[in-house]
Image (cartoon, coloured by chain):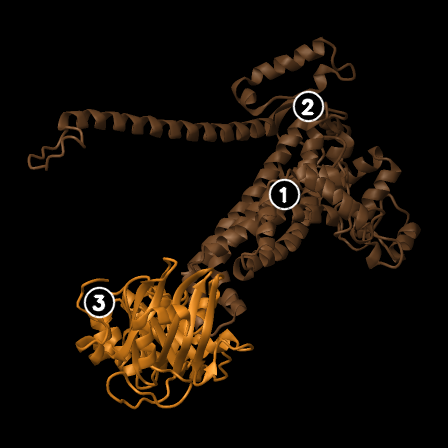
Chain colours: A orange, B brown
Amino acid sequence: MSNETSADRSIGDVIEANPTTATGPRIGSTEAVFEPPGVIETNEMSVYYGAFRAVADVSLAFGKNQISALIGPSGCGKSTVLRSLNRMNDLIATARTEGEVHYHGQNIYADGVDPVEVRRTIGMVFQKPNPFPKSIFDNIAWGAKINGFKGSKIEMEDLVREALESAALWDEVKDKLNESGYSLSGGQQQRLCIARAIATKPDVILMDEPCSALDPIATLRIEELMLELKEDYSIIIVTHNMQQAARVSDKTAFFNVKLNDAGMRTGRLVEYSPTDQLFTSPREKDTEDYITGRFG
Amino acid sequence: MSIEAPERPKAPELFPGDEEYRRHLGGRRRKAVIFQMFCLAMLSLAVLSLATLLYTIINDSFGLVATVNENDPEEIVAGLGHDPEVTGLQDLSHDQLVGLLEANVSRGVGRRLEREQRFYEDRLVFESDATWAEICSSGGSPTGCTAGPRPHADVLQLVNERVVVPDVIASYPLVSSLLDPAGFEQEVTEEFEAGSFPDHDIEQVSIEWRAWFNPTFLTTPQNSTPEVAGIRTAILGSTWMVAITILFAVPVGLGAAIYLVEYARPTRLNEFIQTNINNLAGVPSIIYGMLGLAIFVRLLEPVTSGAVFTDGVPPSDNGRTVLAAGLTLGLLTLPVVIISAQEALKAVPDSLRHAGLALGATRWQTVRSQILPVALPGILTGTILAVARAVGETAPLIMVGAATFVTTDPTGPFSKFTALPIQIFQWTSRPQPEFHNIAAAASIALLLLLLTLNAVAVIVRNRYSRRAE
């Protein structure tokens, strides 16, 4: 634990309350809750953009077959944390990650780990739907092809159908698989992107504000979809929408912006609790202020 | 007309009152109109300059000419016992035309023509059977040994060129020819009276329309007589050069652009390279010519003359070949290709790159399957425009030593060659006015070539952007 963290009591409390080790059971914050080892665990992770420290000392464990939500005000670094979980931050030339991110006990930032392999296992859905400018079929088939899909044409068709069914999109597009992905509505495009992520058979799906560009009905469909998908996948979602976090997630992490001694704004993890507990009886004053709408 | 807004909240000290506001509005609108008119005037000026350019070229390419024939076709026809009122040269039989050639053309020229293509399937006119059999059995036998006999039209053209020998003594531009044809006749008469044409008699002069830009002009090789000169050698030279330019500049430029946009991190070195590429795009073409002369013609002479590819005699005795010129133009085009490809790649949204990479694709897989197809229309448009620019370049070609007078077609990368702009340049510097006419006609050909390239760019772009949607 760095000096900066110990200078800030509330953060220290959080980390003590949520000790994260690579394996083994964990003790919850107020009551003893048995948790299985997390599918992804971060250990003292900090992300820098150049000299700027965007988030500091995040230690979190995301459970298997759970939906974990990351919430917090703008600029608190929740998207940065999400992107560092499958090394998408590597794409930003100035970004640098310190600390460890364990996937089933393996540090994905260790030397010799290929980010390509990490991303194939830990898929991602983005804020704005970003289908490829190709047919609906090719949008889904491409991910499988580049990852060395060996099946026949019929098996590929089955894979596409299965992915579209999992994303609850099959019935709407089954007659127009050869049409462009852009011909779909915003909500359908986002489900296409989810189907595309599913088709490469990942283990974890990261979602970066997947509903922020969608209308309420499309949002509801995606939320229903997430609840279905958690049977097979572990989902980590960043959201601006606290109701959404409350509706879908099992555990919620609240991030806040703190000024450090030098006056730099750095995002820090404030509280990580089971969702119902975080929204009904938050441990931290900051969390309570945020969820009751006093700021953010 | 003004709009009444009785309930507008009062802010008298910050905003003007209604009356003042309306006065001000009038001023704003006047300024807008003036600016609009200014832009329209500039557009008109641009259109006018282009129209003037086209006018000049077309004006010189068509029009009335005064021709003097060495042998009058009517006399020739009469000499063969026909009525010149009824029969023209074109009505004469194949035998008669060949007979005319035989009577009027020297034996050496006749042999050359026959070796090119013979006159009869079954017999020879200028060559003896024995020599013919000998040259046809040797290794490099001429085309006449295998090709069929010359068609009637071909023989007719030969008779025109070699027996009638038309000589254009004066020409008139298109617009004057249309508006004042009598003026031309008068001008020619005055010239005769002044004794400008001591070799000719005014009775021989025939005044007729002539399109300097015609199919024959495109398909005949260069000649020192403007009436029969064509631009086939120049067109083929330009084509070979462009092919080499594209083969060099496109793969190199595209590769460099992909590296700079997709892979390069913003290090000092990469920024230095980027700045230099931008600067190179603005370097005058004559400098590229000097570079081409030093590197491709001199330093790499064994390569550009083809010496390293053959054991015996090199295809060319020095480096002033199509290959050297094509590579020079490739260098000239390269920065523009890189920059336009970079722009096209940068225009592809990052969300597509992220989508590809988040699926576990490598960078190359993402670029190959997702980025390039989207960027391709832009890349192709930029590349074709850059190449079109190179086709019209003259200065670097003069530096690397494109020949100005070549009558044989280029046959490969190691040929001596000439190019359209060089040909135009050379013809315009001749004193005889007929050369200016064919220079204008060659300009039309060059413009048409560029127009074709641009049309290809548009078609390709539309086709690919439709596919990308």
The quarter of the displayed image where residue B126 is located: top right
Compared across the picture, whether B296 is left or right of B20 comes to right
Q: Position of residue B57 (x, y in %)?
A: 58, 30
Q: Chain of mark 2?
A: B
Foreground residue among A245 and B180: A245
Q: Please determine whether, in this image, residue B388 is positioned above or below residue B346.
A: above
| Amino acid type of the residue tagged 2 in the rendering | Pro
Q: Position of residue A30 (x, y in %)?
A: 24, 84
Mark nearer the N terminus (2 vs 1): 1
Q: Chain of mark 1?
A: B
Residue matched to label 1: B391
Q: Chain of mark 3?
A: A
Q: Please determine whether, in this image, residue B5 is positioned above or below residue B410.
A: above
Instruction: Please state which of the two labelled residues, at mark 2 or mark 1, is closer to the viewer.
Output: 1
Foreground residue among B93 and A118: A118
Residue at point 41%, 81% (across, down): A202
Q: Quadrant of the C terminus of chain A?
A: bottom left
The label number, if any, that marks residue B433 in the structure image: 2
| Amino acid type of the residue tagged 3 in the rendering | Tyr
Q: Disc 2 versus disc 1: distance between alpha carbons?
A: 26 Å
The quarter of the displayed image where residue B21 is located: top left
Residue matched to label 3: A290
